[in-house]
């Protein structure tokens, strides 16, 4: 069985990240000031982000192709500039808090 759990509200920006910074959750662009804010080197979301917690048995069944996973599993992608070049962090690590 799988369930979705809150994993946090923060994502750390890479060192040297410069504006403009674009943030996407599950491919949907988020709005600074509404969906998130930037505090120092962290993106802080206005709501908790959710990941799917999959039991060992279900993980094995998915690996064998018996069935899929249908829980909520949010991913965060961050686009930013560093040294004049656009860079992307895909599936950024979500931190508690």
Image (tube, rainbow, N blue to C red):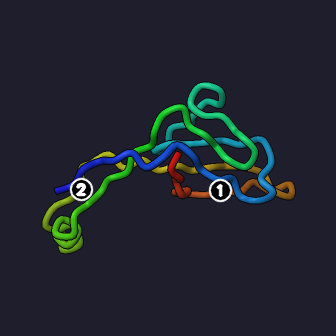
Pointer 1 or 2: first along the chain: 2
Residue 86: give x, y in percent of width and height: 75, 54
Secondary element type, mark 1: strand
At 64% across and 53% down in the image, what residue appears?
12
At 86% across and 54% down in the image, what residue appears?
84
Disc 1: which residue = 88
Residue 60: give x, y in percent of width and height: 20, 73
Identity of the residue furthest to the front in this view: 97
Q: Camera-side residue: 68 or 74?
A: 74
Say which quarter of the image contains residue 67.
bottom left
Identity of the residue furthest to the top in this view: 34
Q: Which mark is residue 69?
A: 2
Image quarter hosting the N terminus: bottom left
Determine whether 74 is above or below 82 in the image.
above
Determine whether 33 is above or below 11 in the image.
above
Residue 71: give x, y in percent of width and height: 27, 48
Identity of the residue furthest to the left in this view: 66
Residues at marks 1 and 2, CA–CA distance in whole angstroms: 26 Å
Secondary element type, mark 2: loop
């Amino acid at each position: 069985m799988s369930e979705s759990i809150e994993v946090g509200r923060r994502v750390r920006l890479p060192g040297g990240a410069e504006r403009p910074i674009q943030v996407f959750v599950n491919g949907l662009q988020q709005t600074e000031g509404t969906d998130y804010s930037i505090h120092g080197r962290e993106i802080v979301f206005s709501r908790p982000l959710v990941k799917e917690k999959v039991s060992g048995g279900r993980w094995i069944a998915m690996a064998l192709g018996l069935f899929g996973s249908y829980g909520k599993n949010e991913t965060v992608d961050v686009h930013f500039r560093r040294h004049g070049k656009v860079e992307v962090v895909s599936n950024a690590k979500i931190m508690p808090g």
